[in-house]
Amino acid sequence: MTHSHSHGTPESGPPRRVLATFLALIVATIAVATAIGMVALWPDATTPKGQNPYGAKNVSILSATVKGVVPFDCGSGGEGPDGLPMVAGDCAKVTASTKAGAATFTLDAARFKAGIESGDRIKVIRLRPPGQAASYEFYDFQRGLPLALLALAFGVVVVVVARWRGLFAILGIGVTLFALTEFMLPAFLAGEDPLAVAVVGSTAIMLVVLYLAHGVSIRTTSALFGTLCGLGLTAALGVAATGWTSLTGIGSEDDQTLLAVAPGMDIGGVVAATMIVAGLGVLNDVTVTQASAVWELRALQPSASARETFGSAMRIGRDHIASSVYTLVFAYAGSAMTILLLVNAYQRGLAEIATTEQVGEEIVRTLVGAIGLVLAVPITTAFAVIMAPKGTPTDDAEPEVEPTGPGSHREPSADTRSLQ
C-alpha cells in the first residue's frame, strides 16, 4: 500500500531542502553569469542612429480629422512607368482639419481603394519650406485609442481568469519588452555579437519571467533548465543553418536601409539571433507544460518508477510537440502572408519561392525553432523526472511558492498540494 510511507520518513524533508539549495546555487550562478554578459555586451552611447525623416526642420506630423473625400480620375491604369503592376482606379482629394488649420492632400489609387471616409481620424505630414505655403501628405490612421483599449481588455481578461499569475505574466511581458528595446536591439545596432546578445538577453528574460509567472519552486527550475538547453540548441542550429543556407539578412529594401544606417552590424548574425528570440515563447510554453505534467503524474502515481513517469510524460509531450510545431508554422506563415500572396499571384512554383531570401529565411527560422522545441521536450522531461518528489503525495512536503498578494488565495487539492 502506498500509504505505508508515513509523514516522518527520513527521505521526506532534508533531501528536498538540500536539492532546493543546490538548485538555487546553480540558478544564482547562471544569473550572475548572465548579468556579467549583459554588462559586457551593453551598448554604449555610440550606438548608430539614423536620421528621422519626419524630424527635420519644417517637417511635422499632425493629428487630423477627415472632412471630405472627393474621388477623381488620375489615370491609374494598372501599370506603372517601369512596367510593374500598380493599382488601377480613381485617386481621391481629401480635406481634413488640423490644429494648424485645414489640410488638403491627394491619395493615390491604392490608398483610396483601401478605404477612407469622412470622420476618420488620421495623421498627416506637414511640409512648410521657408517662404512657401504649407503642403500636406497622408501619413497614417490614428490607432492609439483602439490599441490602448485592446491592451486594456487583454490585461483585464488575463488577470480575471489567471488572477495573480496572470498579473505577474503581464509584468513578464514588460520585462521582455525592456530587455528587447533597451538591451538587445541597441546591442545589435552597435555591432555586438548578435548570437551572444540573443543568448544572454533571452536567458535574462527567462530567469525573470519563469519565476515571476510560475513562482519559485523546483518545478519551475526544471522548466528553466529545459528552456536554457533548448535555447542553446536553437542557437547552435541557427548559426549552422544560416551559414549553410547562405542567408545574408538582406532580402528587402528595408534590410538594405538598416545596414546603411548601422554599417557595423552583423546583419547575417542577426538572422540567426532572431531564430532564438522568435521561438522563445513556444519553447517556454512547452517546457513549463512538461514540468507540470511530470509533477501531476508523480502525484497521481507516486509509486511509479522514473522510467514509467518519463514515458507517460513523453506521451503528453508528443501531443504538445505536434500542436506547438503547427503554432510555429502558422505564426510564421501569417507574418509572411503578404509575400506569399504576391508570389502566388505571380504563379511561381513552391520550390522556386521557397529558395528566395525572404521566404527561405522564414522557412529556416521555422525549422530551426521547431527542432529546438522538439529536443527541449525530452530534456525538460528528464530534468523534471530527476527533480520531482518521490514517494506518496503526503511524503515530500514541498509546497510551491506562489506569488503572494491580496486575492492570491488558491485551493489546491490535498493530494497534489504537497507535491508542487
Image (tube, rainbow, N blue to C red):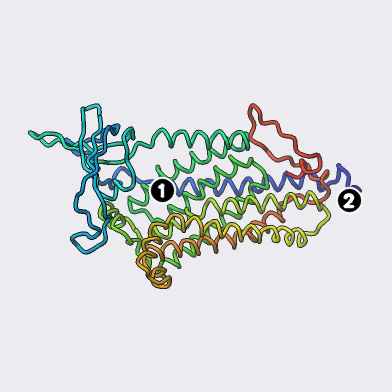
Please tell me whether mark 2 sits on a helix, a strand or a loop.
Answer: helix
Above or below — where is 151 with respect to 2?
Answer: above
Q: Is residue 164 left or right of residue 170?
A: right
Where the C terminus falls, by quadrant? top right
Residue type at mark 1 is Met
Q: Residues within 10 Å of mark 2 (few under 14, many from 20)?
A: few
Q: Position of residue 351 (x, y in %)?
A: 42, 73
For residue 233, the mark is none
For this rendering, which residue is in front, 274 or 93? 93
Q: Is disc 1 in contact with disc 2, using a CB cutoff of under 8 Å?
A: no
Residue beneath the point at 22% across and 40% down: 93
Q: Determine whether the residue tagged by mark 1 lies in a helix, strand or loop.
A: helix
Residue linked to disc 1? 184
Between 362 and 380, the one lying in front of the other is 362
Horizontally, is 399 left or right of 279 in the view? Answer: right
Q: Earlier in the sequence, mark 1 or mark 2?
A: 2
Where 55 falls versus 1 (above or below)? above
Name the residue tied to disc 2: 2
**Residue closer to the observer: 416 or 163:** 163
Nearer-the-camera pick, 62 or 409? 62
Q: Position of residue 219 (x, y in %)?
A: 67, 47
- Quarter of image, res 406: top right
Name the residue at 29% across, 46% down: 112
**What is the three-letter code of the residue carrying label 2?**
Thr
